[in-house]
Image (cartoon, helix red, strand yellow):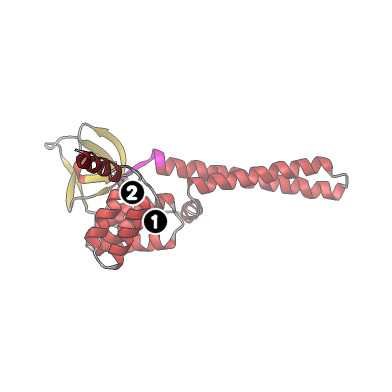
Amino acid sequence: MARSIIYTLLVALLTTPLFSETPELLMKKANEAYIDESYHKAIDLYERITGMEVESAVLYYNLGNAYHKTGQYAKAILNYERALRLNPSDDNIQHNLRVSRARIGDRSEPIPRLFFIEWHDSILQLQSVDGWAITAIVFITLFSLFVALLFIMKNRIQKQIFLAASVFMLLLFLISLYGANRQYERHYLVREAIVMTPRVTAKSAPSESAVDVFVIHEGRKLEITGELNDWYEVRLPDGNIGWIRRSAATVI
């Protein structure tokens, strides 16, 4: 009887959160599996971490690499895109995303954009939402400091210097605030998805009997503009809009 009680207590103790696998432990095991070229095992471990509602650019980047190694390019693209949302300026993520995109069947070219739009977007991608927000806090703090010094200083030249510095800090604060707002809209308000099936035909309405409007291939990124039952209304970068089944795409 006593032995049975002790056994039960030991089982209960070993199954408590203290002894359960933590995200850090799973990440270590997944990285080791990846180094050993056990890519499917690494994928399973990385996915278990995502199931714990853990988000990090490194996690998604590693998972994307593992999927790429197994030839699952759409899933690799999905995870690289998720990593970019958390760390949009990372060159390695951007490079690997381009490599995976080059492996998919859809070779459609994006619509050329005016140079200042490209410049605007490249500036936004320098930082994530949190990065822009922190930058905005730094600049508004400096602005407050320079304004305080402006009133303290008695020398006319010093006042002019701190006035100019205050205006400059205020301008940088507004730019950072704009960057944080735009990144927030892009990453949290605009819903995007990656096509997960080799080929899907978009319909003019959320019905199988509706007219075919265009064909999209595995790995293509779409903007979700609406949804009805088990259908997504999606828009391509060229402006084409159609309806596809939810099961054909996974939200980034």
User: Which residue occupies 36% across, 46% down?
Assistant: 54
Question: Which quadrant of the figure has residue 113?
Answer: bottom left
Q: Earlier in the sequence, mark 1 or mark 2?
A: 1
Numbered disc 2: secondary structure: loop
Task: Locate the N terminus by quadrant.
Answer: top left
Task: Count residues near mark 1 (Cα–Cα under 10 Å), then give few for <14, some for 14-19, many for 20+.
Answer: some
Q: In the rendered image, which residue does mark 1 sit on? A: 58
Viewer-proximal residue, 35 or 89? 35
Q: Mark 1 and mark 2: span between their CA atoms?
A: 28 Å
Residue 35: percent from the left, percent from the top?
30, 67
User: Which residue occupies 17% across, 53% down?
Assistant: 198
Question: Start and end of the magenta stretch?
Answer: 188-193
User: Which residue occupies 22% across, 43% down?
Assistant: 7
Amino acid beneath label 2: Pro
Picture disc at residue 237: 2
Q: Residue furthest front?
A: 2
Question: Which quadrant of the figure has residue 6?
Answer: top left
Residue 213 against residue 65 in the figure, above or below = above
Amino acid beneath label 1: Val
Residue 231 covered by magenta stretch: no
